[in-house]
Every structure is written in C-alpha cells, then in structure tokens.
Image (cartoon, rainbow, N blue to C red):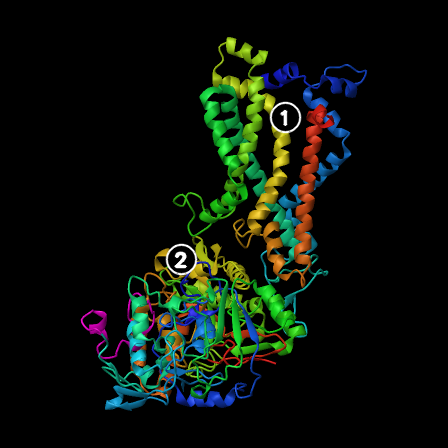
C-alpha cells in the first residue's frame, strides 16, 4: 500500500493538466483515476485496446473459433484443396466457403493458421516482453539506486549490448540454439523458448536505461530519504518504495515493446530461425508466401494483414497510454 | 550417388544428386532396349557458334578430373571439356568409346583388359602435346593419391594389380596399369571385375588423361592444386594464362568455357556447336527459371526441378521449353533403426502405412515430377520388375494415399494399445528450402496422426546431410529429404551403399537407417559377385523386396529431372546424367 500512496502524494507531477481535466469538482483522485479519465477521452487508444482484447480472445479461443467457423485444424494438410489446373501441377486454392482464407502450399487451412498464429505471436511477444521488463527493471534499479561502480558496470554492459546489431545477434543466437539438441548443453531447447530468450535478451536494455533514469531522480525524493532515515534496507527502498512509482511508465513502455517484439518474432521466423514447424507464425507464413506470391496471393495477404493490425493496435494503445500518463510530454 | 552428398566446399545448396561410389555391372540387354526406347535428339545437326549461359544455384565441386563426381561436374566439365576413356552419348544407356578407340578387349579370363586409344587427342595449351596411354596411367594412379581425394577409386579400381603396393608407398606406380605403347592401355586385375570389363567404371572423370610431366608439381603437398592449372582434352577449356593457371573461373560465381584450340573434331562424337559457355552460380531458382524461360540463350544448370509455382508457370506458358528425364533415383523418408521406437519393425510399417505419398509428390509438383515409388530400384534400372515393378506385395506400401486404420493396426501390433505413439519426441532433420521443406512439413503433419511428436529441425541442405543425417552419432530418428540415385545402370548401386551393414560409417554415412541385417548383408555380398546381368537383376530385385519388407525407409517418388531452356536454344539432355549436355546443345 505504501507504493500507491507514495505515488499519489509524492508524484503529483501532472497536477496542471489534471486540474484542467478534473474541472470544478476538486475531490481527491488517485493517479489511476486521473489516468483513466484522460485515457477515456482518447477514442483511438480505446479502439486499439478493444482490438487487442479481441485478439487476445481470438488467441485464447482459437480452437473454438476454428470449430465454429467449420475450418480444419491448423496443421491438418490435405491435397483435397489443390487445383491441378491445365498442366497437372497441384497448386493451392484461394478463399472459398470451405477455406475462408484459402489454403497454403501444403493444403492447410489458412484461416485457422492465421487464428492460431495470433497465439504464437502473442505468446511470444507477451512472454518476451515480461522477461525483458523483469531483467531491465532489476538492472535499472540497481544501476540507478547504487550509482558508482555498480552503475558504471551495468550501464557499460547495456551500452555494449546496444552497440550490437540486434537482428544479427538474434539470428546468431537463434540459429546456434535451434540446431540439434539445443545450446548451452541442452539447457535451451529449440522452439518457442529460444525465440523468447533471444527477443528478451536484446530488448531488456531499453527498459534498463529508462528505469535507471527514473530511479536516479526518484532516489533523491523525500519519501526515499524518509524511508532511509527510518532504517529501511536497500532492498526495501528499491522494491517497496521506488518500484511502485515505476509501474506506470513500465506499463507504457511494455505496451510499446510488445509490437516491436511481435515484429521481431516475425522477422526471426521470416529468416528461418524463429518458430519451428508446424507451429503457425505470421512471419513464417509471409516468408513462405514469397515463393508463391503470384499464384497464391492470399498466403501473404491474410497473415500480413493480421500482423499489421496487431502491431498497429499495440502501437496506438501505447501512444494513448503514454499521453494519459504524461500529457505534457506529448504536447510539447 | 545421392542427393546432397557432403559439401566439398562450404556454402553450396543444391538438390542435384551427386555421383557416388559403387561397383556396377552392365545390363547389355537393358541398355540396348533402352536405346531403342528413348527418343534421342543428339543426331540432329545444330548451328555452329553462339554463346550459351547456364544458370545455377551452386558451383562445380572441383576443376580436377581426379576429384569430380558430382552430377553438375559432369555437366559443366567432364562432358564438354575432358575425354575420359569411355563416355555417355546423350541417348544411350551404355558407355561409348571416347578417348578409347573401341570397347575393351578381354583376355586371361577377363583379368587382362586391353584398350586401344585414339591418336590425335591433344591437351589444351600450354601442354599442347598428344595425349597417350601413359597419361591415362598417371591419371588413374593419381586417383589414389590422398591429396587428390578421389572418393571412388578404391571401390572401382581397388582390384587392379599393384594398387596396394602403390598406396602403401612401396611402388612408384601401379604395376597393373601398363602403357606398352602410346595408343595401348593394359589393365590387369587380380580377379575379373565386371565394372571394368564392361567399361562402366572407365567412364568416370578420373580416367581423363593427365600429363604427368606438367601435373606432377601440382600433385605435391597436402592438397593437389592441379585443379587450378588443369589442362583439357575435350572440345572446350576454361581460359588460362601462359603458365596454365586457370583464369576463367571465379568460385561460386562464374565458370567459363571456350573452344579448346587443340581439339580435333574428327576424333570425337561430340558436335560441340557452341563457341562459349558461361556457367553462372548463385542464382535464385525462381528468378533463374523465369529468366531462362522468357530470355534468350540460357539453360538450367544444377537445379533438379524448379519450385512448384514456377514449374506450373513453365508448363502453362512455355511447355515446349521444359524437358523431363528419368532421374533413375528415389526419394525417401528414412527411419533410424538404432533409435527407439524404430527398432520395432511394426512401428516402421505403421509409419509407411500412414504416409500419404501422393501428398508428398504434390509438394514437389505432382505426378509430372515422377511416379509414386513402392520400393527402391527405379524404372529403367535392371531389377525393377523383379522387385515388384510399380506394385507392392506389402499392404503398407500399397496405398499411395496412406491408410490411417492400417497404420494404427501396426501400432497396436507394436504394443501401442491406443494405436498411437506415446513415447518421447523424436529428432527429425530436413532441408530448410522449398520444395524439400514442404515435403518435410507434410511428413511431420502426417506422422502427427499417429501421435508422433517431432523435434523437427530445418537446416540448410548440405548441413542436413553432413552434420546430421549422415552422422550416426547424432541419432537422428527421421530424415524426410533423403534421395539416392544410380551410379550406372546396375541396381547394386541403388541398394548396397544404402542398406549394407558394412557401409555404415561415422560420417558421410549413406546407410541412414543403419540397417545391419546379417542375412541381408550376406545376400548382398553374394549378389556383388554375380557376373551375368540377368542374374544380377534377379538378385538385386529380390534384395530390394526384402529391404522393403523391413520398412526401414518409405520411398515415395521415382523422380524425373526437369530441365529448362530458352526458346532459341536447341538443347539436348544426356540420359546418363539427367541434365542438359552442353557439348550437344546449340543456339537456333
């Protein structure tokens, strides 16, 4: 409880705009209430949020949706939906009542693969984001709170990682860990785990930097000094006093990282080092579709549209959240 | 030979089949019949002159005739630029004299082989002199030098008198290869070797003459550098400088052939119409296909078949520019009998039963690409009928669309009460590019019907074989992209390298199933020694049937090679190689 109260009391940062929004009724509002009031007026962000909720529902209920629509399971191949054409070469057929989005070159139903692809994309993006936020938060907290040599070491580490061409690094790690029985003596097995690991490995640095900056200023605040004078331990100050004040910005940045991670997963899968078959991944579908684009346009269009919508929704929501939490930043 | 042998140089990708070692006997009867059957186009005259461009994905393995053994090496170098003792005319399934003047003469119970050579075959600059029997002797001797790294000499030429003394370093040359005069070559063997008496193994690139006084200095050291200084006896040569150093080759990019000024048309059966031929490596298959079909003066090089979508486009819009030749090969899904549960024959039969081979054929372009296979020896090879022809005596190989109920019965027989596999997940390693990738994914989803969970890894083509499937230590359970082709028109080369227990080796292994059945091994050893073609066909056909009965692999297609040409190219395919033969090709 300390955290929230501290936040309200100690970080009223946005009082100016808040007052304008709140208007004559001067009742006390928690920061969350203020935030929600502002967000409520942002229609675009709300629409994006609704779309994301839909996506999440679609991912969770993928088997049900596929069943309701009457589509085949995503990995079931069939040569029933090939057309032989004039020359007897089997090629996939386009959208029809049997296959809403058409079939892929293996005769699998593209609709169910796109729906299940949302699962893979969200699973990876959320897990990778959670992992990178966790790592970045801890590193940033320590660097910002202890300063001195701890900060030097951690910040240089972050600088070094940021200097890496991350896509190349990601491809390197992914391909090293995706072969045979995995890497690090079999600790990391090929599959979704590798992709999540790679993405979080290259993404935590941004979070670490942001958190460090925030902590550097927060640690000088009175409530921190008060806690220190009461004899609170470093750990208590970091995690019970400072951390709660970071929750709001973290949510914003996490929302902005998610679409990046979705795209990163798609890029890795496109390059052949991401999700392993037969798991449907939008990036992999787009990659496979490049071979057959002029004879099977649907294979690229539907996964591409799904990817576009998802990334756009997360980006718009992220922007909205940022505006709501820190309206001045966006206005200036 | 097999699809994608160990890569000789890193970074190559191809689906072409590489020549592989194995003893071979000839079926004269079949070859003669085949010659009648196959419509030849080598006889018609073409126009002289012009430049041809060959578009390829990868490059040749080596310029050194002592090393070459890859299908594309034959197409780009061995056929147009070298004169081996015997060669393959485009439409014949038997050897024809090339540097030799006639077929071998046998004496001493088949243990002495006398070969008359043509006079007037000359080396390209800077050697310029006439090639003689001594040059063939040196060529065959250097095939045994470790620095040349030839892969078939011990198998085909190992029974020549004096080989052991030579390889042990006790003799300076091989005493059983003699050159009594410049146009006579005598080969003596310790026992009759059918592969030599029928001239089959004397068609190999390693019999092309090599001038000792010029090449010897390059054959010193750890790796021979003769390839960078090679001289030619065929109608074409790679441009070189005055010292003989090759200048017309940029590895993985471009290989150029120009006319060999020292080649005499009168001594050769090759018409050699073209003035220049450029082999361009590093092409994208899809783009290359379109460029060839819509362009001028181009043909396909090392790719066995274009991607399915492009194949369709080719047949729809450019049907006359697509050519099919029987690949004399099969593609199969291999199961490793040393990895559980594939030690159980009933599990293997269940896998064979569940596989929808028609669906797999569809991933490569459908029935135009080849018929569904029911066993290993392909049509046109002796033993095909004896092995069952197109039919199969086994229920699990009889239904090209697969049969889940039958597969489940076999699973129950194997002790899986539910009819589904419930053990740990299995390692499957396949190619990462289409169409092989699609085949692998199709196999994966078909196996899921039986409950198989796979750790399916897609890796570059050459890695799949050199690092995983061909390395028993890796314990890869399933390889979905295996293929194997003939060396010659004898079915020993289809069966023995891939199923004889003695051929399991720690790396570059071709017995992927690690089948080591004492009874079968003994039958194969017996069949190797059978001299007459009919007896061999019967024996190898029976062994094929027995191996199919163990269901260690699921052969699913006997595929054709698909070759493409531009409209203005009068291209000729070579049946032996399955590719275009540039020495017979001309520009309209």
Q: In the displayed structure, would residue B106 be above or below residue B239?
A: below
Residue B462 in picture, x, y percent from top left: 44, 61
On the image, numbered disc 1 is attached to which residue?
A248
Magenta stretch holds residue B440: no
Q: Quadrant of the N terminus of chain B?
A: bottom left
On the image, numbered disc 2 is attached to which residue?
B467
Label 2 secondary element: helix
Residue B374 in picture, x, y percent from top left: 48, 75
A47 left or right, relative to B411: right
Q: Can residue A120 be seen in this view?
A: no
Q: Residue B123 carries which label?
A: none
Magenta segment range? B144-172
Q: In the displayed structure, would residue B294 be above or below residue B198?
A: above
Q: In which quarter of the image is the C terminus of chain B?
A: bottom right
- The span from disc 1 to disc 2 (Cα, nearest Å) is 50 Å
Query: Please, which residue is most extreme toward the left here?
Result: B170
Q: Is residue B460 visible?
A: yes
Residue B136 in picture, x, y percent from top left: 32, 79
The prevailing secondary structure element of the residues shown in magenta is loop
Residue B566: name its quadrant.
bottom right
Label 1 secondary element: helix
> Who's the residue at 49% across and 34% down the image?
A160
Magenta stretch holds residue B152: yes
* B105 and B501: which is toward the camera: B105
Residue B141: name its quadrant.
bottom left
| Chain identifier of the residue bearing label 1 in the image | A
Q: In the displayed structure, would residue A315 be above or below residue B96?
A: above
Whether marks 1 and 2 lie on the same chain: no
**Label 2 Cα neighbours within 10 Å, binned few <14 / some 14-19 / many ≥20:** some
| Chain identifier of the residue bearing label 2 in the image | B
> Who's the residue at 62% across and 53% down the image?
A286
């Amino acid at each position: 409880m300390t955290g929230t109260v501290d936040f309200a009391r100690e970080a009223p940062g946005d009082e100016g705009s808040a007052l304008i929004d709140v208007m004559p009724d001067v009742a006390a509002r928690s920061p969350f209430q203020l935030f929600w009031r502002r967000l409520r007026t942002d229609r675009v962000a709300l629409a994006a949020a609704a779309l994301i909720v839909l996506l999440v529902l679609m991912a969770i209920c993928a088997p049900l949706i596929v069943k309701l629509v009457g589509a085949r399971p995503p990995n079931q191949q069939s040569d029933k939906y090939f057309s032989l054409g004039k020359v007897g070469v089997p090629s996939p057929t386009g959208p029809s009542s049997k296959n809403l989005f058409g079939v892929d070159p293996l005769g699998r139903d593209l609709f169910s693969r796109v729906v299940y692809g949302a699962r893979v994309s969200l699973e990876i993006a959320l897990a990778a984001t959670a992992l990178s936020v966790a790592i970045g938060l801890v590193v940033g907290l320590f660097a910002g709170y202890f300063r001195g040599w701890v900060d030097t070491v951690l910040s240089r580490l972050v600088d070094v990682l940021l200097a890496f061409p991350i896509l190349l690094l990601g491809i390197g790690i992914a391909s090293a860990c995706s072969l045979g029985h995995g890497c690090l003596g079999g600790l990391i097995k090929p599959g979704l785990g590798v992709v999540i690991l790679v993405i979080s490995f290259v993404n935590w640095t941004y979070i670490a930097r942001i958190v460090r900056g925030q902590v550097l200023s927060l640690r000088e605040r009175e409530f921190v000094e008060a806690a220190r004078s009461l004899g609170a331990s470093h750990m208590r100050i970091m995690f019970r006093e400072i951390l709660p004040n970071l929750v709001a910005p973290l949510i914003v940045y996490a929302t902005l990282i998610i679409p990046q991670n979705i795209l990163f997963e798609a890029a890795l899968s496109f390059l052949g080092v991401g999700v392993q078959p037969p798991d449907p991944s939008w990036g992999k579908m787009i990659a496979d579709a490049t071979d057959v684009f002029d004879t099977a346009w649907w294979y690229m269009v539907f996964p591409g549209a799904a990817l576009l919508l998802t990334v756009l929704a997360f980006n718009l929501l992220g922007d909205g959240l940022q505006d709501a939490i820190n309206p001045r930043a966006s206005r200036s | 030979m097999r699809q994608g042998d160990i890569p000789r140089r890193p970074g190559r990708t191809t689906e072409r089949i590489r020549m592989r070692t194995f003893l071979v006997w000839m079926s004269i009867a079949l070859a003669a019949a085949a010659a009648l059957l196959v419509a030849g186009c080598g006889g018609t005259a073409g126009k002289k002159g012009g430049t041809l461009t060959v578009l390829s994905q990868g490059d040749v393995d080596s310029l050194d005739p002592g090393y070459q053994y890859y299908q594309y090496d034959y197409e780009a170098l061995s056929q147009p630029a070298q004169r081996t003792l015997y060669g393959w005319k485009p439409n014949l399934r038997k050897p024809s004299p090339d540097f030799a003047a006639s077929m071998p003469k046998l004496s001493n119970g088949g243990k002495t082989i006398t070969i008359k050579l043509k006079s007037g075959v000359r080396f390209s600059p800077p050697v310029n002199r006439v090639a003689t029997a001594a040059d063939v002797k040196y060529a065959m001797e250097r095939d045994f030098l470790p620095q040349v790294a030839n892969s078939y000499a011990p198998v085909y030429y190992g029974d020549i008198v004096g080989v052991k003394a030579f390889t042990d370093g006790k003799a300076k040359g091989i005493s059983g290869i003699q050159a009594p005069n410049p146009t006579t070559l005598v080969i003596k063997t310790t026992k009759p070797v059918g592969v030599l008496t029928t001239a089959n193994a004397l068609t190999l690139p390693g019999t092309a003459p090599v001038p000792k006084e010029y090449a010897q200095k390059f054959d010193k050291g750890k790796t021979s550098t003769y390839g960078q200084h090679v001289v030619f006896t065929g109608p074409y040569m790679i441009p070189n400088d005055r010292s003989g150093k090759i200048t017309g080759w940029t590895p993985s990019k471009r290989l150029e052939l120009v006319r060999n000024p020292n080649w005499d048309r009168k001594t050769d059966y090759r018409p050699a119409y073209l003035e220049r031929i450029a082999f361009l490596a590093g092409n994208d298959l899809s783009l290359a296909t379109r460029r060839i079909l819509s362009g001028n003066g181009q043909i396909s090089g090392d790719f066995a078949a274009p991607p399915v979508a492009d194949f369709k486009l080719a047949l729809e819009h450019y049907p006359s520019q697509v050519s099919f030749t029987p690949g004399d090969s099969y593609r199969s899904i291999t199961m490793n009998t040393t990895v559980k549960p594939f030690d159980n024959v009933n599990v293997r039969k269940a896998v064979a039963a569940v596989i929808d081979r028609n669906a797999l054929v569809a991933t490569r372009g459908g029935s135009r690409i080849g018929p569904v296979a029911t066993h290993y020896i392909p049509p046109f090879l002796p033993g095909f009928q004896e092995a069952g022809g197109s039919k199969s005596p086994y229920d699990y190989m009889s239904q090209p669309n697969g049969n889940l109920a039958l597969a489940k019965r076999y699973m129950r027989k194997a002790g899986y009460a539910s009819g589904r596999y419930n053990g740990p997940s299995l390692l499957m390693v396949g190619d990462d590019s289409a169409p092989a990738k699609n085949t692998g994914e199709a196999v994966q989803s078909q196996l899921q019907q039986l409950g198989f969970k796979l750790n399916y890894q897609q890796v570059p083509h050459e890695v799949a074989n050199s690092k995983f499937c061909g390395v028993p230590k890796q314990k890869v359970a399933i390889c979905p992209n295996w293929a194997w082709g003939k060396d010659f028109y004898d079915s020993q080369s289809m069966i023995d390298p891939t199923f004889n227990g003695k051929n399991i080796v720690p790396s570059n292994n071709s017995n992927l199933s690690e089948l080591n059945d004492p009874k079968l091994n003994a039958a194969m050893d017996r069949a190797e020694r059978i001299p007459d073609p009919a007896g061999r066909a019967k024996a190898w056909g029976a062994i094929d049937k027995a191996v199919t009965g163990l269901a260690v692999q699921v052969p699913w297609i006997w595929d054709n090679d698909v070759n493409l040409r531009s409209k203005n190219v009068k291209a000729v395919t070579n049946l032996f190689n399955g590719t275009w033969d540039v020495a017979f090709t001309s520009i309209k």
